[in-house]
Image (spheres, rainbow, N blue to C red):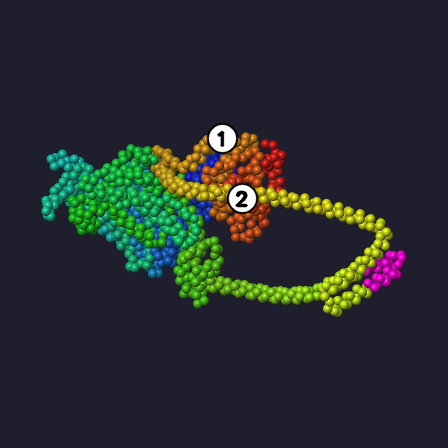
Amino acid sequence: MDGGKKVWVPHSTDGFKLGRIVDIGSDVIAVEPFDAPGTTINSLYDRTFPAEEYDNKDCDDNCALMYLNEATLLNNIRIRYMKNQIYTFTANILVAINPYFEIPDLYTQATIKKYQGKSLGTLPPHVYAIADKAYRDMKVTKVSQSVIVSGESGAGKTESTKYILRYLTENWGTHAGPIEQRILESNPLLEAFGNAKTVRNNNSSRFGKFVEIHFDGKNSVCGGFISHYLLEKSRVCSQSKDERNYHIFYRLCAGAPEDLRQKLKLAPPDRFQYLNRGNTQYFCNRQSENSLNDNRKSQQYLKLGCLHDAVIDDVRDFQVCNEAMSKMGVSDADKLAIFMLVAAVLHLGNVMFEENQDAKGGCKVTAGAEDSLTTAAGLLGVDREELRDSLTSRVMQATRGGTKGTAIKVPLKTGEASSARDALAKAVYSRMFDYIVESVNQAIPFASSNNYIGILDIAGFEYFQVNSFEQFCINYCNEKLQQFFNERILKEEQALYEKEGLNVKRIEWTDNQDCIELIEAKSQGIFDLLDEESKLPTPRPEHFTSEVHSRNKNHFRLSVPRKSKLKSHRDVRDDEGFLIRHFAGAVCYHTNLFIEKNNDALHASLEFLIQDSKNPLLQRLFADSKANAGKLSFISVGSKFRKQLVVLMEKLKSTGTSFIRCIKPNVKMVDHLFEGANILSQLQCAGMVSVLDLMQQGFPSRTQFSELYTMYKKYMPADIARLDPRLFCKALFKALGLDDKDFKFGLTKVFFRPGKFAEFDQIMKSDPENLAMLVKKVKKWLLCSRWKKAQWCALSVIKLKNKIRYRAEQFVMIQKSVRMWLCVRRFRPKYETIQKVKSLQTQLALMSQIVGQLKKDKEQATQKVRELEASLEAYIKKIRTTNITRDEMSRTTNTLMTNIDVQLAELKKQLEQQKNAEEQERLRKIQEEMERERKRKEEEERKRKEEEEQRRLKAEMEAKRKKEEEARKKQEEEDRKAAEAMKAELSKQAKEQAERQAQLDQEHRDRELALRLAMEDQNQVEDIVLPPPLPRSEAVRAFQQKAANKKYDLSKWKYAELRDAINTSCDLELLDACREEFHRRLKVYHAWKSKNKKRTDKGEHRAPKAVEDAAEKAFAAHPEQKVPTQDKNAVQRYFKIPFARPSDEFRDNNKHGMWYAHFDGTWIARQMELYPDKPPILFVAGADDINMCELSLEETGLTRKKGAEILENEFEEDWQKHQGDAYLKKNANKISSKFLQAKLGIAK
């Protein structure tokens, strides 16, 4: 089928599977997978994509693929991943796949030097290329830059951030002294306190950070600044079974020196309540594992051994963290204070409570927790009993009449005391983390900064079996970043193209604004509803959840937990959670801890206790609490985070932006395992498919004419400086030898195609030597251009001179002709008379000849002839010498002629008898000549009648065409109204279809997310439930009803079966049905091919554009039009119109091709394309259906096109001239036209 065309079809695990087309249906394509011969997959046209010609060929830039679709995008990334090429460009966006192992020589010093100053595309894709581009853009445009590193947890965002920082500091931070090293050393320090092991990532960042590298006037690193966002404080107190707390807790237990360990009273991780609920194994390598004493190991470690990871080692990393703090300028006393607070959090978690049985009620610390209480109090620098009281009770004050009342001590229940303990632990740890980030910023200060490069590394989209407030905030942040990506790359880019008049096809994408509004809208947004609930006297999670559902009824993005694809979420009640359909998939949130986690304030007793601490570091951490004491304002965690996010988004919008999309290849986090469906889901959620569509026809690089002109102006000589900026840019590009296809001029800017970053960077380099060199090239090009113009001018002058000379010669010719005409007019009568007289001399000669033949009276006759000769001579002399009138000349001439005629008649009479025999012979010859003349006239009459018959036939065709045209015109008004009504209907349906498609896409993403979660937890996932079909218009419903009532249901017939039925069936009704279904499938298939054409194709045309436009117009007016029935004696009609392919659009009209078509009734039987410079192209129905016009005669509009229809003999003449009959005989067994079968004498 179509030469066994290779295509990609969807697959549940591989994403897409490669196969070949074996059949085409009206709704699906049947494909035979290459890895499962003999089986077929029925795939929808919209989800089937053509494949590249070569299976294992890869491209550095996805935009360079021959077919641009999500299947070839995935396959290109797969091929590169298997070759350990983890980076791939999509225009100027980098796709990075986490390899989960160290690739040799990928990040060495030599590699760093190799990428310095190199444009995108000149070297293989790399994170260093993006870093270098950001630096060069900052240097040239004088605008700060941002690099947004995004992706799921475990996709490698943090590592990519490290490599960018390393590249920038090692290339341009050597003059910054210790700042360069401190920027790099900040990573292990922040990772120790802010990263943790999760089920999806051994080194997951549990906070977001925006690292700014600042540059001075010389574009060298002068300092840095780190902003952090949303530390996951709840992890301090609890983790899932296979997860760990923050790395620092385990590193302190595993790597702390023995004296420090004794001082902090540390024990194995499973001895601490804040650690033993999750995984208590250390990360070690073989060397560190041997150095670890058993008294530091947990029971889980002793039973299962250590964990292994290429970049994490708890024993070694403690020393790395300790050294990093020293390099950051943290004193030994502050380091000890930090470690004491870390240990205090651990011991605080071991303080347990039980109900107090005395009359006071409340709760008390258990006897087994007294030692932990004492240790925690000592490490926090507070009194042991005061800590006990603050944890088991709280102080409330009543205010009456504007004066403070007495303090009331309220005992706390066991659960309330545990919450107070956890709140204190989280507050201490989060404040300590803030202090560490502040210390890093103080260690990398900058006095003055011209610009900066910011690297955003924030937690990726998260989804677990149980999702709480942290996941809600993280996913909200990812929604904002995805919206920024959509606006910067898709929306703003397309708006700029439209403004500049580039005529780039518009690309649609899924907008997530409605999801963001659901979360952050005023009054009814989830954040505001949560804050309202938190301010109530007795806030309840159930009430908050019910308010979320009631205030946002029928919101597409919001649903109840029982609508989740994951069956384990069906048990969650409606007032215990909600489901949000994010851009990456649906996530079910449990709201029981939302209110608690949204309020990070300590109750008054704990606040006062910490403020009175003897630990200097702890006092500094809570200094702002004392300043805010007594204030009634409630600032929630959500509000703080939203404000931080607003500041971050403003920074991103004010900078130039580069994007790195990190991809996680598999959920097992192992190397060389490519889970296609998982990766495809990530690519779709990241918007890479939409980006591919836009970038392949877009212009990622651009600059203004005026900016480019200003950059070069001071290096220009005066004659070049006078050029218009636009003209100068044109001269510059021509001087560089750029192809016109590589760039495009807008109204105010010039734009460059993907893959042309090297050329763009060469133009934009601002070093004086480069600018001066380019100016020289421009000057040289202008000189050459002007020399060529001078040559053309000289040639034009010579051409003009020759034209003037030619015209002068023609003037002389005109004068000569006029003078000649005047002379002729004056002397013509005498001249004509002399001519007549001289013509009489020939008769005298004849008379002399006759006289010579006479036998009697010969002398007398001779004398008369001489007298006549003398009179003629005298008369001629008289005409020449005298003025004689025309009448006199006429009378004299006539008299002479009469005399001569009489004499001649007499002489002839005498010879009559002598010449009877000769006269008879002459008459015979005349009769023969007359017979030939008669036959010639008969032949001419026959040809005349044939021409008249042809004219009559053409007149009949023209009359028929006019009649059809008149009938058509009568329906134009009805068609117009029908078209308008149909347009409105189609517009409505398109909108509804878009909404339905968005729902389907969301359903697919939800299910994909649920499947990935189910793979981790062996859960069950519900199948996709398709939304109800859209209501159709009356016309469409009538058409569908008519189709349903047809005698033959051919929807399940294969393409080959339809073809065979057309070739062999004698049932006219079945034949009509097969033909209609056959050509309908061809239309659908060709529409699919057109949509998925090659990147370099101008478009495939099986008929002239006028024919295709007529069909499209006819369908717009009457989509339900009925195809005429094919009768037994179908009329044969022939057509001929010009055929200009897209590549011939601007060629000479004489070089355009001609398109011939022979219609056997309704459908085309033969097709021929003739070009002056190409071999003829012949097609016949049955053998070449895929390449022929699939439209019916009515749909083509050829019968209404003036001059298009030709006679049969005209078609046959050209068909036979180009070996058409030989082609018919060659394909005799495949021909489907009954007319052609009869012509060849084939019985079927």
Determine which of the numbered discs, if any, sits on residue 1048 in the image: 1
Q: Amino acid at mark 1?
A: Tyr
Of residues 923 and 1029, the one nearer the viewer is 923
How far is disc 2 from disc 1 in space, using C-alphas?
Answer: 37 Å
Identify the mark nearer the N-term, 2 or 1: 2
Of residues 889 and 15, the one nearer the viewer is 889
Residue positioned 50% across, 35% down in the render: 1077
* Residue 1152 covered by magenta stretch: no
Majority secondary structure of magenta residues: helix
Looking at the image, the residue that sits furthest to the right is 856
Residue positioned 39% across, 43% down in the render: 684
Residue positioned 35% across, 42% down in the render: 584
* Residue 847 covered by magenta stretch: yes
> What is the span of residues highlighted in magenta in the rendered image?
844-868
Q: Quadrant of the C terminus?
A: top right
Viewer can see residue 26: yes
In this image, 86 relative to 847: left or right?
A: left
The location of residue 616, given as percent across then percent down, is 19, 50
